[in-house]
């Protein structure tokens, strides 16, 4: 990476990027005293084995420049060229005497690519390239108030599904339009920032549990999001600070989702995106003072998260249900002096029974028992 001096009227940064990640996957379903006939070859008491090596490679060249048109008005433009190559190789599945179609029976070569596997039934690679860009304009209305507008794009690389019979998934792309403000008030005693945004998401990637409990990643079609977010930091009085933040997001599919052109609709246009509540907000109040030559504090924090579905497809939503809205309150009071501190606290004081996730153990068409991962219960 190279960069020009930041004090110049025109400044730039440019560079090259390379990353290689590997994941040696081993997943073994062991059953004591399993019949030798249906064991994975070379793995005693093993009904199912995943022995795979995933390798992700990313390459990029990027450049960005900023030109100060005036002392208050600046324009920034940048571009990033990328290339990725991701691969998955090895073995997954049962012995041929347990399944005549999967696992060992599906091996296309007895050559062992990933050490420890009985043979090889997956050896796939996906690759792609393209570019992303960003254009940004900022205007300082005063020394304490700035507004900006941004047009930017982003992407995630494609990859290989663990189930070798499934096709790879492609990269997805996001286009973001955003206007916002960053302001300071009353001699920097208060700060108020915010933004309005509208986003288009093409070939979005989403995951779900398929057959045999294996996660599948697919590309959908189009989705869109729009919303507003803001945060406030206010020094109300000496030692007393209030910090708050909120976000409203309207995220939905912009076209019907079908696994293939001839498949039935599994998620209709207009359905909400998963794991995205419409509203999230928080407020924290903290007071600090000196007591008997010690630093004392008292703090309360309120956090609210709206409801959301954990899955995209309507059939899965009917089985798994919806994550309920939750509101938690944390409280703490304490003192510290030099090298020691004493504090009493309560997390989730009113013991709200919110949930971080809901799921089933395999495809929702087969498994109907719903498990939940709760938020932390009241802790004192």
Image (cartoon, rainbow, N blue to C red):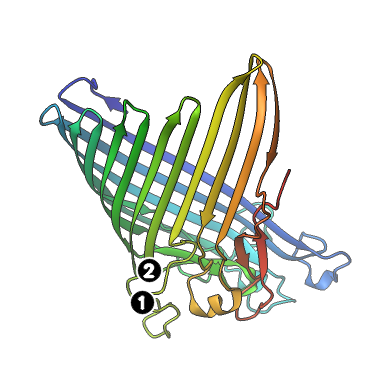
Mark number for residue 269? 1
Circle 2/circle 1 CB separation < 8 Å: yes
Q: Residue at x 57, y 68 (%)?
A: 108
Q: Quick one: label 2 or label 1, which is nearer the N terminus?
A: 2
Q: Which x, y percent locates residue 100?
A: 67, 79
Q: In this view, does 114 lie to the left or right of 344?
A: left
SS for dot 2: strand
Q: In this view, does 98 lie above or below 8?
A: below
Mark number for residue 252? 2
Q: Is residue 369 left or right of residue 52?
A: right
Q: Which x, y percent locates residue 47?
A: 76, 68
Mark yes or no: residue 187 visible: yes
Estimate the spatial distance between the alpha carbons at disc 2 and disc 1, rounded to whole Å.
Answer: 8 Å
Q: Which x, y percent locates residue 309?
A: 52, 68
Mark yes or no: residue 175 visible: no
Determine the image quadrant of residue 266: bottom left
Q: In which quarter of the image is the N terminus?
A: top left
Q: Which x, y percent locates residue 150?
A: 23, 46
SS for dot 1: loop
Q: Which residue is drawn at 74% across and 76% down?
A: 98
């Amino acid at each position: 990476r190279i960069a020009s001096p930041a004090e110049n009227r025109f400044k730039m940064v440019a560079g090259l990027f390379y990353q290689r990640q590997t994941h040696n996957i081993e997943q073994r379903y062991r059953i004591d005293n399993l019949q030798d006939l249906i064991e994975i070859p070379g793995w005693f008491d093993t009904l199912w084995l995943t022995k795979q090596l995933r390798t992700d490679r990313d390459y990029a060249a990027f450049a960005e420049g900023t030109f100060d048109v005036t002392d208050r008005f600046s324009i920034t433009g940048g571009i990033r060229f990328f290339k990725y190559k991701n691969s998955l190789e090895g073995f997954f599945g049962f012995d041929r005497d347990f399944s005549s179609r999967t696992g060992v029976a599906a091996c296309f070569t007895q050559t062992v690519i990933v050490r420890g596997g009985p043979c090889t039934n997956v050896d796939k690679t996906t690759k792609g390239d393209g570019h992303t860009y960003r254009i940004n304009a900022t205007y300082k209305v005063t020394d304490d108030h700035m507004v900006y507008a941004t047009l930017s794009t982003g992407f995630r690389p494609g990859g290989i599904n663990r189930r070798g019979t499934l096709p790879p998934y492609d990269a997805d792309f996001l286009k973001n339009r955003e206007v916002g403000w960053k302001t300071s008030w009353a001699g920097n005693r208060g700060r108020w920032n915010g933004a309005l945004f509208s986003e288009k998401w093409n070939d979005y990637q989403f995951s779900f549990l398929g057959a045999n409990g294996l996660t599948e990643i697919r590309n959908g079609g189009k989705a869109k999001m729009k919303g507003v977010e803001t945060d406030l930091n206010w020094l109300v009085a000496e030692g007393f600070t209030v910090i708050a933040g909120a976000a409203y997001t309207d995220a939905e599919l912009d076209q019907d989702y079908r696994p293939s052109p001839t498949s039935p609709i599994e998620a209709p246009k207009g359905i909400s995106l998963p794991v995205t509540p419409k509203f999230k907000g928080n407020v924290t109040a903290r007071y600090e003072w000196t007591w008997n030559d010690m630093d004392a504090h008292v703090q309360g924090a309120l956090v609210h998260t709206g409801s959301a579905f954990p899955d995209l497809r309507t059939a899965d939503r009917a089985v798994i249900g919806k994550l309920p809205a939750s509101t938690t309150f944390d409280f703490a009071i304490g003192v510290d002096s030099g090298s020691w501190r004493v504090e009493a606290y309560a997390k989730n004081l009113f013991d709200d029974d919110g949930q971080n996730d809901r799921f089933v153990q395999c495809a929702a068409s087969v498994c109907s028992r719903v498990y939940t991962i709760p938020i932390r219960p009241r802790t004192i």
